[in-house]
Image (cartoon, rainbow, N blue to C red):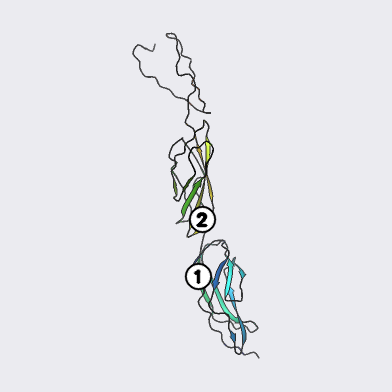
Amino acid sequence: MNIRESLVQPGVITGQAQVCSNQAGVIFSVVANPPVMPIGGATQYVWTVPGGWTITAGQGTRQITVTVDATAGIQTVSLVDQYTTVPNCPSPSQSTTITVNPIATINSANSKTICNITPLGYTATSATPGCTFAWTRAVVAGISNGVGAGATALINESLNNTTTAAVNAIYIITPTINGCTGTPFTFTVTVNPTSVITSAAAQSVCNTTPLGYTATSSTVGASFSWTRAVVAGISME
């Protein structure tokens, strides 16, 4: 018959109070090593982590390293001290809770078309409450603006298209929640050019003769509208 001394509850577990979904290398520990009891002999710490988490190192010792899964919310890590041989006679359990923050995603529109040199007026949003946002925009041929960057949900740049065709500018927006970087999001802005008329600026016609003037533009897809003020000496018949 094996006689075993009762084992005491392990000490307080220390570790990060908040972690990110899918985070690796998360450490939990207690101060003391598993004791060797005068009668029962060697003991070991047996750690229990949430389903889906993986203990990558340290099971049986005072410190473990784990990889967290994608499940967000409050999770529990616990351990007992028990003998290395049967009967194990586990101690009372010690536990700690951890908040797992989600990987935030952006759910606002992924594209927008604007006129040249017009404030963008785009606000990034996320289904994860409390997110902050950071964004960058690289230089693109045909847009005269330099590199763009910001740390707000609102992007309100006025982009200057110097060409005669529409140009796409690409923004990369990244949400963050409690220090956890979310999924980068690509937002495409199509900047239409300022249309320019390239047809003749003047024409002479005979009296009461159809004008026959056709406006043209170097801007592909341009449409036209026109007005004519009343002029002394000109009457419409």
Q: Residue furthest front?
A: 146
Q: In the rendered view, tell whether residue 214 sits above or below residue 162.
A: above
Q: Residue furthest top?
A: 207
Residue picked out by circle 2: 104
Q: In the rendered view, tell whether residue 28 sits above or below residue 116.
A: below
Q: Position of residue 139 (x, y in %)?
A: 52, 42
Whole-angstrom CA distance, mark 2 to mark 1, is 22 Å
Q: Position of residue 231 (x, y in %)?
A: 35, 15
Q: Secondary structure at mark 2?
A: loop
Q: As shown in the figure, which amino acid type bears the numbered disc 1?
A: Thr
- Bin the neighbour count of mark 1 within 10 Å (Cα to Cα): few under 14, some 14-19, many 20 and up: some
Q: Tell me which residue sits at (47%, 52%) in the image.
A: 133
Residue picked out by circle 1: 97
Q: In the rendered view, tell whether residue 48 sits above or below residue 40.
A: above
Quadrant, the C terminus = top left
Q: Secondary structure at mark 1?
A: strand
- Residue in the foreground of this view, choosing between 21 and 170: 170
Q: As shown in the figure, which amino acid type bears the numbered disc 2?
A: Ala
Is residue 224 shown left or right of residue 39?
left
